[in-house]
Amino acid sequence: MNRIEPQKKAHLVGLGLDNKDGHKRITQAEDFSIVGGSEETHDRMTETAIKTVEDLSKRGKTLHNAEHEEIRDIILKNSDQ
């Protein structure tokens, strides 16, 4: 009997821990989820995730088929580190 393998999917998750105003911030997209953080941190993480997915797309790749090191390098470049 042939088994159908479940399709694997990669997803970036950002978790901000510096929220002091009590506001609950959640941003979700197909390729990433950003939860928590101050307004500044949340916005910065969201922008980094968007740019990372866009950069991979320009290279003809997705989170699923790119190497971990490549994703890491793109995230670092896009996060102004």
Image (cartoon, rainbow, N blue to C red):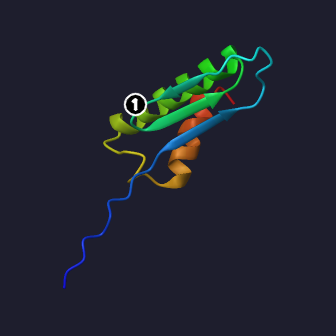
Q: Residue furthest left?
A: 1
Image quarter in which the N terminus is found: bottom left
Instruction: Give left or right: position of 68 versus 59.
Output: right
Q: Which residue is mark 1?
A: 54
Q: Residues within 10 Å of mark 1 (few under 14, many from 20)?
A: some
Q: Is residue 75 above or below residue 26?
A: below
Which of 43 and 68 lies nearest the eye of the viewer?
43
Quadrant position of residue 61: top left
Instruction: Give left or right: position of 44 versus 70.
Output: right
Image quarter in which the C terminus is found: top right
Which of 71 and 27 lies nearest the eye of the viewer?
27
Q: Is residue 26 above or below residue 22?
A: below
Q: Residue 51: horizontal and vertical position, in percent?
A: 47, 27
Q: Residue 80: horizontal and vertical position, in percent?
A: 65, 26
Q: Residue furthest bottom?
A: 1
Q: Residue at x 51, y 48 (%)?
A: 70
Q: Which amino acid type is shown beneath numbered disc 1? A: Glu
Q: Residue at x 58, y 45 (%)?
A: 72
